[in-house]
Image: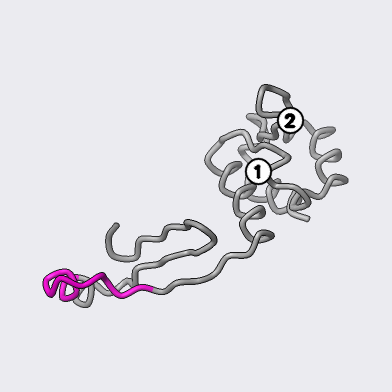
């Protein structure tokens, strides 16, 4: 909600256009704010789930991101102690280590298949 706000739901990314005058005028007229709608395919969704999960320091369930992870890179990054895998009730999870958070963007870029 708000000027420039972005949300993703049911395979669609909705982005309010970043124009305060148009946003306010639409609301004042009882209309929805002007927005763009973009279809998001499954591959993009999995890649963004990985990227955002690691960025937010949340564990990422590997089964949820599927083939978005480069397994060779994952093994290499584990050896460098930049990522770690754990298992819990949701399955195998991936997260950045403390050391990996300092290089988060680069680590995530390496992980993306």
Residue 62 placement, left or right of 11: right
Q: Residues within 10 Å of mark 2 (few under 14, many from 20)?
A: some
Magenta segment boundaries in residue numbering? 24-35
Q: Is residue 77 magenta?
A: no
Q: Nearer the viewer, residue 20 or 64?
A: 64
Circle 2 sits in a helix, a strand or a loop, which is it?
Answer: strand
Q: Quadrant of the N terminus?
A: bottom left
Give the mark nearest the N terminus, 2 or 1.
Answer: 2
Residue 90: image location, x then y, percent: 66, 28
Q: Residue at x 61, y 41 (%)?
A: 54
Circle 1 sits in a helix, a strand or a loop, which is it?
Answer: loop
Residue 28: image location, x then y, percent: 11, 71
Residue 103: image location, x then y, percent: 65, 43
Q: Residue at x 15, y 71 (%)?
A: 30
Q: Which residue is mark 1?
A: 103
Identify the residue at the far left of this view.
Answer: 28
Q: Nearer the viewer, residue 51 or 42?
A: 42
Q: Nearer the viewer, residue 34 or 52?
A: 34
- Seen in the picture, residue 50 relative to 98 is either above or below; the reply is below
Residue 76 placement, left or right of 6: right
Q: Which mark is residue 92?
A: 2
In which quarter of the view is residue 39 placed? bottom right
How many numbered circles are shown? Answer: 2
């Amino acid at each position: 909600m708000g000027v420039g706000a972005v949300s993703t739901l049911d395979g669609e990314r909705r982005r309010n256009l970043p124009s305060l005058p148009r946003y306010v005028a639409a609301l004042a007229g009882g209309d929805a704010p002007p927005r763009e709608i973009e279809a998001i395919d499954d591959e993009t969704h999995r890649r963004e789930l990985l990227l955002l999960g690691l960025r937010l320091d949340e564990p990422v369930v590997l089964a949820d991101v599927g083939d978005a992870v480069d397994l060779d890179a994952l093994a290499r990054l584990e050896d460098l102690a930049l990522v770690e895998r754990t298992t819990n009730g949701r399955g195998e999870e991936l997260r950045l280590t403390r050391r990996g958070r300092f290089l988060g963007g680069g680590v995530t870029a390496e992980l993306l298949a």
